[in-house]
Every structure is written in C-alpha cells, then in structure tokens.
Image: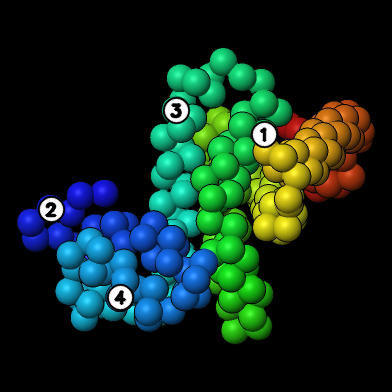
Amino acid sequence: MVLPPDPTLDEIRAALAPAIAANAGFDGWSDAALILAAQAEGVDTDVARLAFPGGAIDMIDAWFAGVDAAMLAALPPEKLATMKIREKITALVEARLALLAPRRESLRRALAMLAMPTNLVRAARLGWRAADLMWHAAGDTATDYNHYSKRTILAGVYGATVTVLVNDESEGHAETSAFLARRIEGIMRFEKTKAQLIGRTSHRPSLTRFISRLRYPAS
C-alpha cells in the first residue's frame, strides 16, 4: 500500500500491518517489528507507535483487518453469486487461510498472544468479526437468533481450522483443507436439522396464542 503525502493514522495502520506481520515471525509482535516496518515504509517511528496505541494486539487486529479486506477483494459479490451457500463459506474461509498461510509463524505467535487471559475478549471479537464478514459476503441476511448462531458456529470452525493450519506440514496444506471440509459439512447438517425442527414446531399449537385468545376473545 502506497501512503498518500499526509496519511491519517488509519492509513498508516493499514500500510504497516502487513510489514509488521512479515517481521513478527522473527521478532514477534513487538516494537522491533513495528520499527522495521515503519522504516521500510518511510514512516516516523513515533507516528507509527501512535497508530497502534494498544501495542501488539492492535498490530494483530490491523493485520487481520487487512486479511479481511483481501479476502473480500479475492471473492467479489459477482463471483460468490455463482456459488451455493456451502461453496461460498468454504471459498471465503479458504481464501482467508491462503492469505494467512505465508505467515504461519507470525500467525502462531499472534494466536499465542490472543490466548492470554487478558486478551480473550479481544480474541473473541476478532473471531466474531471474521465470521460476520464471511456470512455477510455469503449473502446471509438473518436478523433473528440465526444471525448469532451462524456466526458463533463459523467463528468456532474458523478458529479450530486456523490452529490446524499453523501446524500443517502437508503439501498444499491438504490436512487443513480436509479438516475444514469436515467442519463445513457439520455446519450444513446443523443448519438443515435446525430448519427441519423449526418447520415442525411452527405447525404446533401455540400455548401463548391459546391463552391470549382466552383473555381477549375475538369480537
């Protein structure tokens, strides 16, 4: 990313995040990684620190945000429109994993940091954000409890798959792809079963409606 002449902190953050991630595999998510990235991009180090007031966690957050943007760019709406829902979710997760794979050591260090007790809330938010983006990109418009259940399940599947990726030495990360395929199949089975149960219960007599009619009979 080429910075404009007078960049905002948001622009600096977006520009530095990939470079920091490249350094984090060797230097960790540290000030050293930040300084190297700033020097490479021609950004004053003090200004670079201002762009990441939360330190390492903000650096990781910015990196994941960049991955989110790249994932959506790789799978624009017109491309996803030709796919079934299972294919959309699979393609989105795989695109995200492909973007992370070249930085597996940086990812490993990021996951270790996010697993610390003080960072668990932030980690949950990042997982939710990724799942939310993927479901939106897949065309999901649910606003009821399905909105939350879909994202919670996908966030769990994505998180588990990422942990497989960081240790996957198979060619082309085949083990990760197989793991993901099994988990996506589980999501689809769950959604199908849930839809069937909802369909059955929707035809059952409603105790609430019955009581309401007793209290307020039709005129």
* Residue type pointed to by label 2: Pro
Q: Position of residue 134 (x, y in %)?
A: 56, 41
Q: From the viewer's perspective, tell me whether residue 151 is left or right of residue 59.
A: right
Residue lying at the far bottom of the rendered structure: 118
* Residue type pointed to by label 3: Pro
Mark nearer the N terminus (4 vs 2): 2
Any part of residue 192 in sight: yes
Please give the residue where the numbered disc 4 appears in the rendered image. Answer: 35
Q: Is residue 67 above or below residue 76?
A: below
Please give the residue where the numbered disc 2 appears in the rendered image. Answer: 4
Please give the residue where the numbered disc 3 appears in the rendered image. Answer: 76
Mark 2 and mark 1: Cα distance apart in space? 36 Å
Please give the residue where the numbered disc 1 appears in the rendered image. Answer: 90
* Residue type pointed to by label 4: Ile
Occupied quadrant, residue 35: bottom left
Q: Position of residue 72 (x, y in %)?
A: 46, 37
Q: Is residue 11 above or below residue 50?
A: above
Mark 3 and mark 2: Cα distance apart in space? 26 Å
Mark nearer the N terminus (3 vs 1): 3
